[in-house]
Image: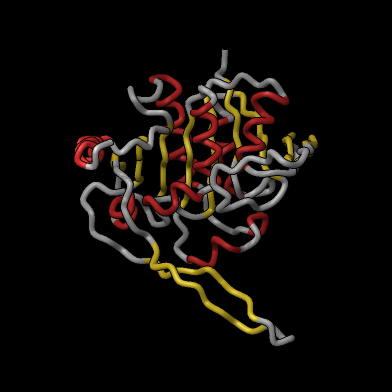
Amino acid sequence: MRPKILLTNDDGVNSGGLWAAYEAMSAFADVTVVAPAVQQSAVGRSISIFEPLRMNEVRIGDRAAYSVEGRPTDALLLGLYGLNLKPDLVVSGINLGENISYESITTSGTVGAAMEAANQGVPALAYSLQMSDQGSKFTDPRCSTQDFSQAKEVVARLTQMFLASGLPKNCHLVNINIPACRMEGYEVTTLGTRLFDTYVEMRIDPRGKPYYWINGDVIYTPEPHSDVTALRNNRVSVTPLTLDNTAFAACGDLKKLLADQGF
């Protein structure tokens, strides 16, 4: 029997990246698309717990999908429990824009959906594609003219590998980032520490009232084996992640601090 894959994303059900992943995987798996109705980037792993959710069966071209009026994690949960899908694997992506470093990993809706899948006991992969033009991340994903041929090759190869072998021990999900330029190979990586130099810009609207843009300049911190460095060197970054955020290296110092203070 063919493996079953639940495919979601954070760019929305109409995104070219989502359907590139579908095309790459449907050759060897039964793929069900359950994705947000509209753009939901940077919402992380947030869940809609104060409002009802609607899910509609739609057709994108000649292909069926489920469109969820909610966040990526909502779509994932409705796929698992609203549709009672029992996938062998969850795939999130292909996201338009890389998701690398400490900064992106916690805000990314693409990675957030994969994290929630792992939390529900389903192995998951998150795929993101670097954009050579940073502005391309913020265009309507339905209008993307991105060439996905290289990304589809990566998705097909790695997804089949993980379906056959499973995820490594002590790994809950894998975050995969694909370079915009011709790739120079694959590399197992760790998370980089910084990606942006963040700032807030205040502007004045036509009525004289202030409004604000949160923005940031892309920076590069040289770190061997990091996902940031791998992508900079045109290598596919393959980063094993865990849901356990415990800072084990700090436990000893924290115990000593508490003991010294009489706790």
Image x and y of residue 203, in percent: 60, 82
Q: Hey, which residue is sitting farthest top in the picture?
A: 1
Identify the residue at horizontal 38%, vertical 20% (top origin). Answer: 165
Q: Nearer the viewer, residue 135 or 64?
A: 135
Q: Nearer the viewer, residue 65 or 121?
A: 121
Image x and y of residue 251, in percent: 25, 36
Query: Quadrant location of residue 243?
Result: top left
Image x and y of residue 121, in percent: 51, 22
Identify the residue at horizontal 40%, vertical 51% (top origin). Answer: 100
Q: Nearer the viewer, residue 12 or 77?
A: 77
Q: Can residue 259 be seen by looking at this rendering?
A: yes
* Image quarter hosting the N terminus: top right
Identify the residue at horizontal 54%, vertical 60% (top origin). Answer: 137
Give the number of callouts.
Answer: 0
User: On the picture, is 250 further left or further right than 77?
Assistant: left
Check the image and report above or below for 9 versus 211. Answer: above
Q: Can residue 254 be seen by looking at this rendering?
A: no
Q: Hey, which residue is sitting farthest front in the picture?
A: 262
Query: Quadrant location of residue 54?
Result: top right
* Image quarter hosting the C terminus: top left
User: On the picture, is 33 further left or further right than 250?
Assistant: right
